Amino acid sequence: MTLSRRKFIRNSAAGSVALAAPSLIGSMAQAQDGPIKLGSLHDLAGPLAATGEPMVYAIMLAVEEINAAGGLLGREVELINYDTQSNIQLYSQFAQQLAVRDKVDVIHGGITSASREAIRPIFSRFRTLYFYNTLYEGGVCDRNTFNTGTTPAQTVEKLVPYAMNLWGKKAYIIAADYNYGQITAKWMRKYVEDNGGEVLSTDFFPLDVTNFGPSISRIQAAGPDLLLSAMVGGNHTAFYRQWAAAGLKDEIPIASTTFGLVNEPATLEDAESRGVLGSYGYFEELQTPASQAFVKAIKDRHGAQTPYVSELAAASYEGVHLWAEGVKMAGSVDRMEVIEALETGLSFDGPSGKVVVDPKTHHVTRNTFLAEVENRAWNVLETFEQQQPLDTAAVCDLEANPNDTTHYIIDI
Amino acid sequence: MSPQVLIDGLIAGATIGLGAIGLTLTYSILRFANFTHGDFLAWGAYLTLTVSGFLGGLLAGLGIGEPIGPFSFGWGLPLSLLAGAGLTIVLTLILDKILFGQLRRRGADTIIIVMASFGASMALRSVLEFIYTANPQYLTRELQIAQPVGFGMRATPDQLLTIAVTALLVLALHLVVTRSSTGRSMRAVSENPSLAGVYGIDVQRVIRVTWVIGAGLACVAGVMSGLLVQIRPYMGFDLLLPLFAAAILGGVGSIPGALLGGLIIGLAEAFTVQIVGAEWRAGVAFVVLVLVLIIRPTGLFGRTV
């Protein structure tokens, strides 16, 4: 990472200095402070490496674009990325390092909800602005934290009735066994029941499970109309292959809040993945000019081996740009000034469309999409314009309670 | 409860059993708990995958790359497995030469050797991830659909083959250990290494044979797991607890015991998923391990240690 970071900073340095020259006199004092530092904490090794890689690529791209346009406040933005190696301990360690030693101005990072809850308190304590750009279970209510990914009210709420309408009312839920999976399973149950359906059973799987034989027999015995999946990571990808091998793929269809977020359609065969439904805040296959330009920019830099450019990449990219908008409006990198600027309801037009900060929850209002896997890629079926984070809004109001730092958990 | 649970348990148990045999042999002959054994499974799978990558193209060129009969793989896989097992054996012999052998010669405490195996395990795993990345890989892209095999059970041909291969390998190995002179030497060394040496048994050779058998079976177990599930750097590490539980349940040093222990662990895991829930599966091996240690520390077929 260091090498490519240096490389692009070197490349963009000349441009930023030239462009910044007219405003140099006004911001001389600031220019002498050196670069604005943007910290990044993502897994580039271990089971979550394939998830972290495109997020870092998206952040690199956003920083590169900001620097090419003259930096922020006449200063260059320097990216400091640490590889957390899918290890929660390293998250805590590097989070402290970013806040205390590197003294960064903002941090973008965290993938699993477990990692987020490990580092979020550290950034509160050291008063360092934090952006979490991953789709998650919702409910984080913290004035120091901005969440740009989708939450269940924006996606699961669309996915469940769509799937039930197609396939039937009896659902079986499988999910990863940590806070994301546990809470998302509750949301799934709520939406199934809200739509007059029934959940036969819910199974949770630790992230290291790869052999699903016994569980598949159990699901088959229960005989649901559809399977709702919130499985996470490369190990759990094995489920879909074993599901197809058990001959169940055409009997019991799957809708998922996580499938295809990394590279599942590309790593599995068409026969194993065709027909799986998913709903996210972005798909690489979106045909808008902004989306195509974004995907091309990432793929041009990282070549044929680039992982799928999912909502995680789009939200990371949009997160960095939203923060940059906040800095521009505030005219400063001061944490509170940037937070107040973002709380005016700043927006950015990203690859997924317009993304608007919601001042009450520090989440975003954004477009979401529903798609189906076909020929090892997503076929986008529906677009839902400007979806609000209603789940978190039901429990969180940072305008009324600015000192709240709770992670609210849906009570069903 | 569907009878399918039996098939599921046997398939998982076959892999665990084959892996546990190597573990139980190193334990009884080299006298330490070898934490690198899980990583031998992973290395075996990756080495086989690499060879089959080269071989696949070659055999396809000769026009014999097509899947054999009902199975999902062609002749490339059995051939690659032989080469992969050979390379895994070389790997373990090198590791013994540069690490465990050195410690043995210095008369290091068992705990030192165990810790060394722990370190080697981490290093082996990280090297795998460095070379092959953490993304799951597959030995074959063919998809097999499970067929009815009677009594309401379904299995894929690949799954049935792994059970058959396991049974044959264990039978062959059992005959070698109980009937051949090498087997007699192995038993003698496991009984008392210094006395065996005094009686003219080549202890170094027995140690090499132990590694050869352990690594060969680990490679087969890794490839079986890779064929039925997927290949990833952590695959062996995640199996470590069931492997130890199976070896101890079977009785340290007992080859049929290790297989039986593996099958019991596999079945216990499958039944737990059916009866209690998927999130408790991983705990079963641990519960069995603790129960055996409390109730019958020598295991099913173990002698007093």
Image (cartoon, coloured by chain):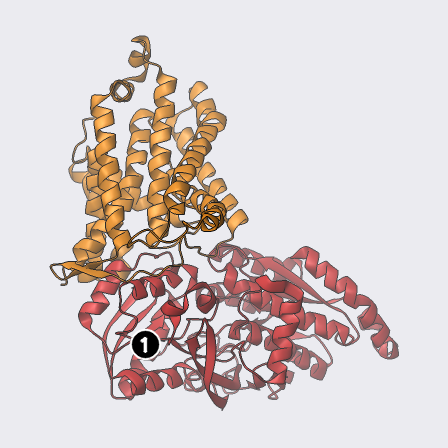
Chain colours: A red, B orange
The residue identified by callout 1 is: A186
Q: Horizontal placement of A39 versus B169: left or right?
A: right
Percent x, y of residue B129? 50, 49
Percent x, y of residue B61? 48, 50
Q: Horizontal placement of A381 versus A29: left or right?
A: left
Would you identify the image quadrant in which residue B169 lies? top left
Would you identify the image quadrant in which residue B210 lies? top left
- Give the letter of the chain under mark 1: A
Q: Is residue A2 above or below residue B43?
A: below
Q: Is residue A287 above or below residue B142?
A: below
Badge 1: residue crowd in 10 Å (few <14, some 14–19, many ≥20): some
- The single residue placed furthest to the bottom in the displayed view is A385
Q: Horizontal placement of B264 versus B241: left or right?
A: left
Quadrant in the picture for the C terminus of chain A: bottom left
Residue pictured at 67% horizontal, 60% vertical: A102
Percent x, y of residue A401? 49, 83
Residue pictured at 67% horizontal, 81% vertical: A325
Q: Secondary structure at mark 1?
A: helix
- The single residue placed furthest to the front in the displayed view is B63
Percent x, y of residue B95? 46, 31
Note whether residue B293 is visible. no
Q: Is residue A307 above or below residue B303?
A: below
- The single residue placed furthest to the left in the displayed view is B151
Note whether residue B1 is visible. yes
Residue pictured at 19% horizontal, 32% vertical: B298
Callout 1 amino acid: Lys
Which is more toward the observer, A170 or B183?
Answer: B183
Residue pictured at 27% horizontal, 74% vertical: A252
